[in-house]
Image: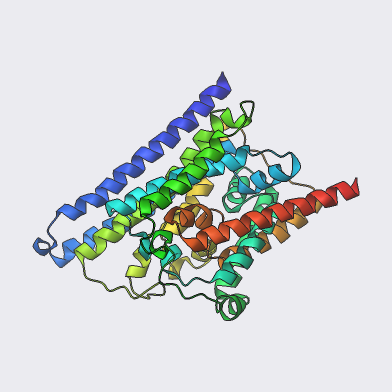
Amino acid sequence: MKQKIREGIVLLLIVAGFIATLVLIFKIRRYLSIDPDTLSDEDLAAIKQSIKTTVIVSGFIIGGLMGAIVQRSKFCIAAACHSIVTIRELTQSRAYAMALFVAILGTQVLYRMGDVDITRSIYVSSPFTWLSYMVGGFIFGVGIVYAGGCASRILVRSSEGNLGGLVSVLAFIFSSGATLWGITAHLRVDVFNSVTAEMQTQYIPDILGGAVPYYIVIAVVEVVLLVFMLTASRDSEWWNWRWPVAGVGIGLTIVFAWWINGIAYKVLPYLDSFSYTGPDDPTLLQFWRPKSLTFALADAQTFRYIILWTGESINFAIASVLGVIAGALVAAVISGSFTWVAPPLQQFKYNLVGGLLMGFGAVLALGCNIGQGLSGFSTLSIGSILTMSFIFLGAISGAKYMNWRLMREL
């Protein structure tokens, strides 16, 4: 009975978090009804600062929701792939499919409503660096198996007191930072990112040039995901309410993240005048580009923010990482599942190697299983779909290799 009360408290906090985020979204949306010509420069500056603060607060809340849901459900694509290899179980894969189902539907509805301009996101407007997507995705996939968790899961495990997860997080931060700004950045830019295909956009309905209506494309993808979920055997753990609800919750965090950033991006040019030149735009507008949850860039930015606080400013991505840590910690403490755990020394080696592979692969591929796999996939970007396919292949390959090594040692 006591445990059920604890779980109920966590669930209430999650529901409250979603409600609070909705309130913040509509707080920003109200600015569309004002006439900027009637406001002074000071008023406009105050409104823009208010929007920025609201977006950052929402990032912390949405990250907290992600952390709490992952902590209580154990949602993880690495575990999903490992289960496929070892016990032929697809429950976690179906939970991921549910998250993707919700993320795609919500994001596309927001796009068609005009609340989120996904064509300005990095997933749709960036060059189609297909080699980076494939190689980076595969390396990241192998890495999550070695690390024992995907990009969000290792953050959550660290917050639960797992020291192996902490090693993976630190290695992930080190590797992603080096690939973004450091010693391996030249390899990323000069070798992999230089191989591109000529494409005006990565949005699949636009690539098809109207030959297939956008709603048909969305419907086909959603039906495939729905069939995959509904074909689970009746004795499968999938039909336990925990997994479908976890998938819906994760999917909603992606949608809400798109929504708050998308509406802020929509309001800002309404209040002021900016120009947008592309994915490498150095102007202030680059700060406001529509985005959702991701951890490749965000983890490295968070570490840089912590150690260079006086020279950095917090943003949605950094706030969401801090939120994941806080949300997972609160959920673990309330549920009574927080405990310090030190894995065997051999596992630390895997945690280290896995984190290094994850950091390099995620930055190279322009995102992780959350960034490209859910946020990017929800935009129906062909690059995101390609990346997620190779993340899956890498994770399956890594799981098979580790399983082979284990059997050989026995």
Residue located farthest toward the front when viewing the structure as drawn: 211
Residue 316 in the image: state x and y as whole percent.
Answer: 41, 57
On the question of residue 198 being in view, the answer is yes
Name above or below for residue 8 compared with residue 36: above
On the question of residue 298 being in view, the answer is no
* Front-most of residues 140 and 238: 238
Q: Quadrant of the N terminus?
A: top right
Residue 51 in the image: state x and y as whole percent.
Answer: 28, 56
Please say which color scheme the image uses.
rainbow
Name the side, left or right, on which 399 lies relative to 19: right
Residue 396 in the image: state x and y as whole percent.
Answer: 70, 52
* Front-most of residues 48 and 28: 28
Name above or below for residue 186 compared with residue 326: below
Residue located farthest toward the left when viewing the structure as drawn: 38
Residue 27 in the image: state x and y as whole percent.
Answer: 25, 48
Identify the residue at image location x=58%, y=70%: 132
Identify the residue at image location x=43%, y=43%: 252
Which quarter of the figure has residue 76? top right
* Front-most of residues 293 and 40: 293
Identify the residue at image location x=57%, y=61%: 387
Q: Quadrant of the C terminus?
A: top right
Which quarter of the figure has residue 44? bottom left
